[in-house]
Amino acid sequence: MPASATPDAPHSSGVEQHATGAGAAGSERIVRPRWRARLVRGFVAVVLVGHAVLLVRGYADPHKFFAFQPFNESSTWRADIVRVTADGRRVPIEEPWPGGYDWDELVRWGVLERPGTMRHAYSGLGTSLDFLDDALDWVADHTPEDDETLYLEATTEAYRNTRGPEVRVYRSELREEAR
Amino acid sequence: MSATVAEPVRGEPSLSLSDRIDDVFDRPASVRSLAVLRLALGPVVLVHLWPFLVDTLAGTTYEDHFWVRWWGFVPEVPGAVQVALVWTGAVAAVGLSLGWRTRLVAPITFVCVAGNLFLSQHHFRHNRAFLLFLLAAVALADSGRVLSLDARRRRARTGTSPGDPGDDLGTVWPLWLLRILAASVYLASGFSKLIDPDWSGGLVLWDRAVRHQHLVRERVPEPIADAVVDLVTARWVHTITSPIAVAMELFIGIAIWFGRTRLAAIWVAIFFHLSIELSASVEVFSLAAIGALVIWATPSTRDRVAVVPDATWVRRLDWLARFDVHEEPGAELRVVDRDGTVHTGGTARWLLWSRLPLVFPFVAVAHALRRVRP
């Protein structure tokens, strides 16, 4: 690192300047305060380590966030979703819903709309079913006019890369409105 | 056709790893490739934000429908914040492409796009994460030094002219960081598929093709539709093409680092992204990824000399300023390479046109065809 070269500063920053000096013979160098040079190197190291961690973590993360594993599966799934009322009835979400709610309107995301139809598992089965689980909670929490549903329940049928079916049951949290 | 060495190759003194790393951080180099990327990113960001802009115009924000917070400890962000993020981001993206107050609008664009992505987990897509990498690099580097209104304003102030030595010099560690991230995206994707027998064995692509064959039938003209559908739904086709697809990703991620294989890797990458664009819905990934290939241009400018009879088109298309262009009416095309080698005829034409980003994909194909023909 050159420390005492006279900066001939075509660069706009008042802190970071160019100078002729060390390194390859006759090459121009950027002169930074020592703290800033360390900060830049530290930042790059943190980014690279964090990126590597996310790449590896993707093998355990159903969503594979920042793991760059696109088009990873050809899996398919569908779900039967019912409202389980306080008196024990199991009402499919396709039937009238107190408050006039509609599943597709509530989620308004193609990945989760029309859950009864067999569809491609967006970004893999893990991602789709995890979002479905989250959506059950979200819908249970955003239907205040519904005073009869105790919880929502989804029974999923999934085929992982043509193999299956894998059947799972997901439930939303219990709703205060129906207690 | 001929190539003569005008002067001996000048070798640089061998540098230790530590010196090379210091060079990445401390030696100024051309930020022109990031400037070209900056030009492309404005439209890419607008395309990316468009659905969100339309929603906000209809009075809808992310919290009106299903959403999932990224971290439980983060309080719910009001929908009005999303409106501010996407509209500010869109305006900033225009400024980004124009290079207007780049040091300000580039970070703003990054923050707005990132902020919108991190409002809900269901906003995440791999192509959006890749876009964030690109925006971050453009924001961290002084990408407005050239090809920008900022540069024009600076030239008016200092009385310099375009093409002055050093006009595009800046810190390039963001470029190197972006190169590592971009290459790792190809490698991560390729490696994950390589170790998955369902993918590398062709099952995944075959099953997708079978289930989406109606789309092929819709897009292909009637007389050949049946034959094409039969082909793309044949299991054996995917047994062959899937390993090739994996190999392409791995090849791009590795070969793009080496001068001898870089042009081939870039051409394969263009083919790869175009084929994905035709066969899948990947939002802005193809645009962003093909645009991002400019980062692999060597960060030095005008270090080759091109003597041409008419410089009009070369100057217009030489966005990366690879050539110090001299116009000599009636002269034979001549290119002096970095090592002093003088090229004329077909070799000079190839060297010249293959370094111009817009024509490279076509020139590369023509060159490859010429080489395989007897």
Image (cartoon, rainbow, N blue to C red):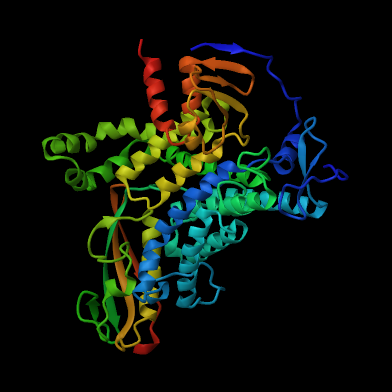
* In this picture, residue B225 sits left or right of residue B37: left
Q: Position of residue B203 (x, y in %)?
A: 31, 40
In this rendering, the count of numbered labels is: 0
Q: Position of residue B182 (x, y in %)?
A: 53, 43
Q: Is residue B120 above or below residue B147?
A: below
Q: Nearer the viewer, residue A39 or B314?
A: B314
* In this picture, residue B217 sits left or right of residue A148: left
Which residue lies at the image location 59% right of the left edge and 11% below the top edge? B4
Which residue lies at the image location 39% right of the left edge and 37% below the top edge? B272
Quarter residue B56 falls in: bottom left
Q: Nearer the viewer, residue B105 or B279?
A: B105
Q: Outermost residue toward the left?
A: B223
Which residue lies at the image location 52% right of the left edge and 44% below the top edge? B36
Q: Nearer the viewer, residue B11 or B149?
A: B149
Q: Position of residue A43 (x, y in %)?
A: 69, 53
Which residue lies at the image location 74% right of the left edge and 54% below the top edge? A39
